[in-house]
Image (cartoon, grey):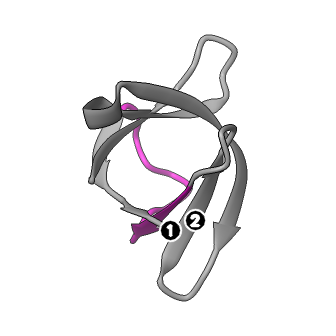
């Protein structure tokens, strides 16, 4: 699914999912061999391939919901 990563007003990483009209703050980041897993405040976990820490934001990326 397509999601948008950006920094919110207080500087925390947030994810916006347009198809669900959902915007949540990232509460945990985990690095795996396949990429990065972001855990959102609502409990969702999204997997990103080739996501680096120095990515320019805002950015629209493909994610897989775990």
User: Residue 57, labelled with which disc?
Assistant: none
**2 vs 1, front mark:** 1
Q: Which residue is farthest top?
A: 9
Q: Secondary structure at mark 2?
A: strand
Does the magenta-highlighted stretch encompass residue 35? Answer: no
Q: Earlier in the sequence, mark 2 or mark 1?
A: 2
Residue 41's place in the image compared with 21, above or below, is below
Magenta region, residue range: 45-58
Which residue is at a point 67% across and 48% down the rendered structure image?
43
Query: In the rendering, at what x and y percent does residue 2 appear?
Result: 25, 48
Q: Quadrant of residue 21?
A: top left
Of residues 62 and 22, the one nearer the viewer is: 22
> Could you say where residue 54 lies in the image, as x and y percent from the top left?
51, 52
Whether residue 29 is situated above or below residue 8 in the rendered picture:
below
Instruction: Give the residue pinned by disc 1.
Output: 66
Q: Check if residue 52 falls in the magenta segment.
A: yes
The residue tagged with tag 1: helix, strand or loop? loop
Residue 31 lies left or right of residue 64; in this view the side is right
Quadrant where the N terminus is found in the figure: bottom left
Locate residue 3: give its quadrant.
top left
Give how far across and how far down residue 25 sits, in percent: 63, 32
Task: Give the alpha-carbon distance from disc 2 to disc 1, as whole Å.
Answer: 9 Å
Question: Residue placed farthest to the bottom in the image?
Answer: 33
Q: Is residue 39 above or below residue 10?
A: below
Q: Are marks 2 and 1 in contact (CB under 8 Å)?
A: yes
For the point 58% across and 51% down, the residue is 44
- Residue closest to the eye, 58 or 3: 3
Q: Is residue 57 left or right of residue 42?
A: left
Q: Which residue is mark 2?
A: 37
The crowding category of the residue bearing disc 1, from other C-alpha atoms within 10 Å (few below 14, some 14 to 19, many at least 20), is few
Q: Residue at x 47, y 84 (%)?
A: 34
Q: Magenta region, mostly helix, strand or loop?
A: loop
């Amino acid at each position: 699914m397509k999601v948008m990563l950006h920094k919110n007003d207080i500087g925390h990483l947030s994810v916006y999912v347009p198809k669900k009209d959902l915007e949540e703050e990232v509460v945990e980041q985990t690095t795996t061999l396949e990429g990065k897993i972001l855990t959102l405040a609502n409990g969702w976990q999204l997997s990103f391939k080739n996501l680096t820490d120095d990515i320019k934001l805002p950015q629209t990326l493909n994610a897989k919901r775990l």
